[in-house]
Amino acid sequence: LHLARSMDNTTGISETTDASTLHGLMDARGVRVPKSISLDYVEGMTSRARGYAVRTISIVRDEIKSRFGGIFDLDNSVKDDGWPKVMLHEWLDDGRRFTQGKRVAANNYIQNKDRQKHLELTDDASQCIRHIAAVFDIHPDKFPHLWACFYVLFFRKEIPLEEFSSSETIKRHMMRLAEIDKTREAAQFEEFVCTLSPNGFHRYWYSTSDDSKHNKRNRHNLLSGTHRGRSDASQWEPTFALHTTSESYAKDSESNSKLNLDCFDESGYSLRVLEKYGGGVTDNASDAFKETRLTYDCISDRLAAQGPVPAVPIARF
């Protein structure tokens, strides 16, 4: 092992390197000095003797590889200069660290069900990427480059092509997670709003909206009260869902009311949830009052056109 390491020209070691220099280089790389051979002997070895030593080490590598049966396999591939990509002492160090609790990289990819030869990001990996991008304000176009750089930092090698995700792949998985979150939150909100309160009262929800102008473009903002995760009414705190900050269909109450209903549909609100709509909160402007009334009318028309809504279960949170 150590003789093979001493032959690696990339370390600055040559046939004229003295024993003390060789000893220092080995210490710097965390390679323990062998007890079975003197470093002074290495200094005086002939090229033929070194060749025999390297071939012997290759035999040992093959023996280790065969005995492990494919588990913790030792990579015997070589670099352009003919030496192994993974030295024995590096492989042993990885094994010791694994025993101490260190772990290999997480499996961030699974086989695509439709195209078996293609890999796709797991939901766990997508969630981690989305969280990192949001917290540190990283644009999805920059994330693949950072990923490739940190891969080198953690593993000291370039990221394999099959593990490289493009910015478009990351964006699509973020959109997929957004759909999953929306469906989950809508189901939780429906369960909450369609059950009776601890005192036996029906629950209703309300919305608030306003228009604003950004960069000379008219936008419509819509919020509504919601509930996320806590079924215990004593622990429930007001929570609000932002439905849109999009451009208005037109700057009038009727168009805004239609946009409000479209946003409720886009948020996954079922007929049972729409049935519990109680109105809106306004700033007392006449247009805002009219928009709230028209939104309520739009929902009432939708419910009337769809027929009877399934009965609300008699349950209490």
Image (cartoon, rainbow, N blue to C red):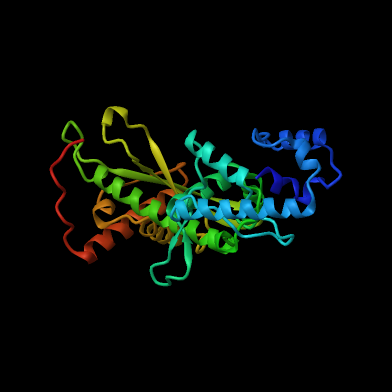
Is 82 situated above or below 285?
Answer: below
Asked whether the viewer can see residue 43, the reply is yes
x then y, percent, for residue 251: 52, 60
Q: Residue at x 50, y 62 (%)?
A: 172
Q: Front-most of 102 and 176?
A: 102
x then y, percent, for residue 185: 35, 48
Asked whether the viewer can see residue 247, the reply is no
Count up the numbered dots: 0
Q: Front-most of 234 and 64?
A: 64
The image quarter containing residue 299 is bottom left
Q: Residue at x 78, y 50 (%)?
A: 10
x then y, percent, for residue 122: 44, 55
Farthest residue toward the right?
16
Q: Residue at x 50, y 41 (%)?
A: 103
The image quarter containing residue 79 is bottom right
Is 189 on the left or on the right of 60, as rendered?
Answer: left
